[in-house]
C-alpha cells in the first residue's frame, strides 16, 4: 500500500511543478496549459461523452486487431512445434519483419485496404503479432524437456501435447508477450489515426488528439493523452496483474 | 515369460566432434513381474538405459523388445519416474496431475471415478492431505511420490524408476521401499529401478545389474536373499560386500575400470539427435 501512496505522492509533486511552471508564464499559456485547464478540459470532454465514444472506438478496434493477432499467433506458434519447415519459415520471416516499425507498413495498407477501420485493424494485428509470436515461440522452446517427455510417456502427441503441456508450461512467456502485444497495439492504433487525419466521421483517441491539435485546443490534447495513459495503466495493472495472479503466480511459475 | 529384452543395445552420444559411449552391447532378459535394480558409478549409463527402454532415445546399436514388440517410441506400457524434480506439471494440483494420467489411460471413466481412483493412489503414497497443493508447495520427496502415484495410475506393465528415493531421508526412504514392494506384489508390475545405493538394491531386487564406466555390464547378480529382507542378517552383509567389490571394479574414483576402452570405435554413428520426442 505504501508503494501506491508513494506513487501518488510523486505524481502529485509532478502536477504541482507543472502547474507552477505553467503559471510562471515562461511559455505561452496557449501551448503550455495549466494542470487546472487540462483537468477542466478533461471533465468537459467526459461530460459531453466525446472522449468516452472515442475511447470506445479505439478499444473496439484494438480488441479486434489484438484478438486477430492472438489467434493467428497461437496457431502459427503451435504449428511451429509440430512441423519443422514451418518453424524455420516463421523464424526467418520474423527476423525480417519484427524489427520493422509497424507504422511503416501503413502506406501499403492504405493503398490496399483504403483509409478506414480495416487498415487500422490490420496494422494493430501486425504490430502485436510479431512480439507476441516471438514470446510464445521462445516460451515453447524453453519448456523443460522432462515435462514434454512425461507428456509423451502419458500418450500425448501432436496438438494435444502442445495444448496440454507445452502451452501451459510456456504461460509466463505468453503473458509477457501479451503485455508487449497490448502495448504495441495501443501505440499502433493511436499512431494510425493520426496519419489518417480527417478521413471519415468516426475516429478513436488518436483522431481526437489530431483534431484538437488542429483547433489548437491544447488542454484537450493533454486531456486525451491523460486518457491514453490511464487506460494503458488500467490494462497493465488490473487486467494483466489479475491474469498473472490467477495463473502463474498461483502455480509458482512466475519466477524463472 | 520374457517381458523386456535388450539385444546388444548400444547408445553413443555425439557432442561436437567427441563421441560418448553411454551404453555398449547391453544384453538383458527381464521376466514379467521381476524386480530389477541397476547400479553403477555416476556416468555409467543407468539413466540412458532407462531412457532407451522408455523410448526417448534412438539406439545406435541393437534392439529392445517389450512384450514382444520392438520399442520405437514412448508408450504407456512403460512409465518412467524421472530423476528430475520438475516432472510434475506445475499448473495442475497434485490431484489433477494424477487425474490427467488416469484420463489418458482410461478415457472411458467419469471425472468422479477418476477423482476417487486418483485419491486412492495418493493415499497409497501417503499424500492424501496434499491433494490440492500445487507442485511448488511440495518438498522434493513429495514431488517424487506424486510422480510415482501418477505413473502407477496408468497401470503400466513396466515401471521405470530413476533414483526415485535419492532425495529422501532414511526413514521415509525405507517406508517407501516397503510401500513399493507391497505395490509390486499387489500389481505384479515389472520394475526396473536405478539406484546408487547398494543396500537399496539388495533390499528390493530379484536381479541386480552392475554397470561399469563406458556403459558395459560388469555383472548381473541374482539376489537370492529371502523376502522379507532385513539389513541385519549375515547373508545380507556378505551380499553387500560382494556388490561393493563389484562396484569398486567398475570405475569409481577415477580408476580406469575394467570396461574402459580406447575411444576409437568403428561402429556406425547415431542418426542426428533431433527433437525426436515430438
Ligand atoms: N544427451 C546427452 N548428450 C551427450 N551425452 C550424454 C547425454 N546423456 C547422457 N550422456 C552421457 O552418457 C553417459 C551416461 O550418462 P547417464 O546419465 O546415463 O549416467 P548415469 O549412470 O545415469 O549417471 P548418474 O548416476 O550420475 O545419474 C555420461 O557420460 C553422459 O555424459
Ligand atoms: Mg542418472
Image (cartoon, rainbow, N blue to C red):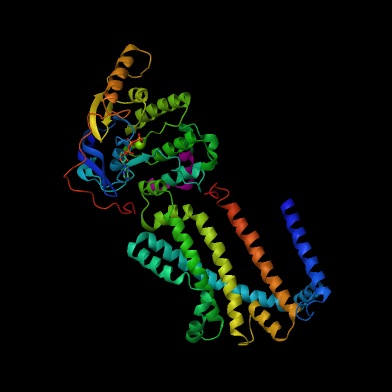
Q: Is residue B1 visible?
A: no
- How many labels sit on residues? 0
Which is nearer the eye, A30 or B136?
A30
In this rendering, the answer to whether A228 lies above or below B36 is below
At which x and y percent is residue B39?
Answer: 31, 29
Magenta range = B103-118
Is residue A160 within the magenta segment? no
Q: Please tell me whether the stretch drawn in magenta is mainly helix, strand or loop.
A: helix
Ligand number 2: quarter of image: top left
Q: Is residue B144 visible?
A: yes
Which is nearer the eye, B252 or A246?
B252
Tell me which residue sits at (40%, 46%) in the image: A146
Which is nearer the eye, B1 or A109?
A109
Tell me which residue sits at (69%, 86%) in the image: A214
Q: In this view, does B101 lie to the left or right of A64?
A: left
Q: Which residue lies furthest to the front in this view?
A: A26
At which x and y percent is residue A23?
Answer: 83, 74
Which is nearer the eye, B238 or B175?
B238
At which x and y percent is residue B138?
Answer: 52, 38
Is residue B114 within the magenta segment? yes
At which x and y percent is residue B117?
Answer: 45, 39
Q: Which residue lies furthest to the left in this view?
A: B266
Tell me which residue sits at (34%, 39%) in the image: B156
Amino acid at each position: 500500500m505504501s508503494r501506491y501512496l508513494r506513487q501518488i505522492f510523486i505524481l502529485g509533486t509532478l502536477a504541482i511543478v507543472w502547474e507552477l511552471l505553467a503559471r510562471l508564464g515562461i511559455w505561452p499559456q496557449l501551448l503550455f496549459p495549466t494542470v487546472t485547464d487540462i483537468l477542466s478540459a478533461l471533465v468537459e470532454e467526459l461530460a459531453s461523452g466525446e472522449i468516452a465514444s472515442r475511447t470506445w472506438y479505439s478499444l473496439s478496434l484494438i480488441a479486434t486487431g489484438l484478438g486477430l493477432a492472438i489467434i493467428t499467433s497461437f496457431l502459427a506458434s503451435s504449428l511451429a512445434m509440430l512441423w519443422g519447415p514451418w518453424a524455420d519459415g516463421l523464424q526467418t520471416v520474423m527476423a525480417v519483419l519484427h524489427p520493422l516499425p509497424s507504422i511503416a507498413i501503413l502506406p501499403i495498407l492504405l493503398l490496399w485496404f483504403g483509409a478506414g477501420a480495416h487498415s487500422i485493424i490490420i496494422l494493430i494485428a501486425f504490430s502485436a503479432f510479431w512480439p507476441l509470436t516471438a514470446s510464445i515461440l521462445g516460451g515453447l522452446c524453453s519448456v523443460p524437456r522432462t515435462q514434454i517427455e512425461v507428456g509423451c510417456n502419458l500418450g500425448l502427441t501432436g496438438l494435444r501435447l502442445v495444448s496440454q503441456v507445452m502451452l501451459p508450461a510456456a504461460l509466463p512467456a505468453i503473458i509477457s508477450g501479451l503485455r508487449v502485444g497490448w502495448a504495441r497495439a495501443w501505440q499502433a492504433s493511436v499512431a494510425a489515426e493520426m496519419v489518417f487525419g480527417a478521413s471519415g466521421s468516426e475516429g478513436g483517441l488518436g483522431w481526437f488528439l489530431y483534431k484538437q491539435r488542429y483547433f489548437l485546443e491544447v488542454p484537450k490534447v493533454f486531456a486525451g493523452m491523460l486518457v491514453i495513459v490511464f487506460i494503458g495503466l488500467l490494462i497493465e495493472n488490473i487486467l494483466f496483474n489479475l491474469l498473472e495472479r490467477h495463473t502463474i503466480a498461483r502455480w509458482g511459475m512466475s519466477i524463472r | 515369460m520374457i517381458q523386456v529384452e535388450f539385444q546388444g543395445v548400444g547408445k553413443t552420444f555425439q557432442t561436437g566432434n567427441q563421441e560418448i559411449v553411454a551404453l555398449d552391447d547391453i544384453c538383458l532378459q527381464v521376466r514379467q513381474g521381476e524386480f530389477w535394480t541397476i547400479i553403477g558409478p555416476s556416468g555409467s549409463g543407468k539413466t540412458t538405459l532407462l531412457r532407451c527402454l522408455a523410448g526417448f532415445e534412438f539406439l545406435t546399436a541393437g534392439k529392445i523388445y517389450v512384450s514382444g514388440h520392438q520399442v520405437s517410441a514412448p508408450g504407456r506400457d512403460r512409465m518412467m519416474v524421472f530423476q528430475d524434480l520438475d516432472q510434475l506439471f506445475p499448473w495442475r494440483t497434485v490431484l489433477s496431475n494424477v487425474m490427467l494420467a488416469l484420463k489418458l489411460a482410461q478415457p472411458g471413466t467419469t471425472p468422479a471415478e477418476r477423482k476417487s481412483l486418483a485419491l486412492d493412489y495418493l493415499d497409497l503414497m501417503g499424500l492424501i492431505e496434499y491433494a490440492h497443493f500445487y507442485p511448488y508447495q511440495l518438498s522434493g520427496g513429495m514431488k517424487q511420490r506424486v510422480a510415482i502415484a501418477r505413473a502407477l495410475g496408468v497401470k503400466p506393465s513396466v515401471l521405470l524408476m530413476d533414483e526415485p528415493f535419492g532425495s529422501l531421508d532414511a526413514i521415509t526412504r525405507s517406508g517407501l521401499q516397503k510401500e513399493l514392494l507391497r505395490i509390486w506384489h499387489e500389481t505384479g508390475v515389472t520394475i526396473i529401478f536405478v539406484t546408487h545405493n547398494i543396500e537399496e538394491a539388495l533390499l528390493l531386487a530379484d536381479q541386480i545389474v552392475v554397470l561399469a564406466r563406458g556403459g558395459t555390464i560388469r555383472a548381473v547378480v541374482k539376489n537370492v536373499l529371502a523376502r522379507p529382507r532385513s539389513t541385519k542378517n549375515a547373508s545380507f552383509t556378505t551380499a553387500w560386500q560382494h556388490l561393493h567389490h563389484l562396484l569398486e571394479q567398475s570405475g569409481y574414483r577415477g580408476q580406469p575400470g575394467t570396461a574402459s576402452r580406447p575411444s576409437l570405435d568403428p561402429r556406425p554413428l547415431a542418426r542426428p539427435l533431433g527433437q525426436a520426442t515430438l
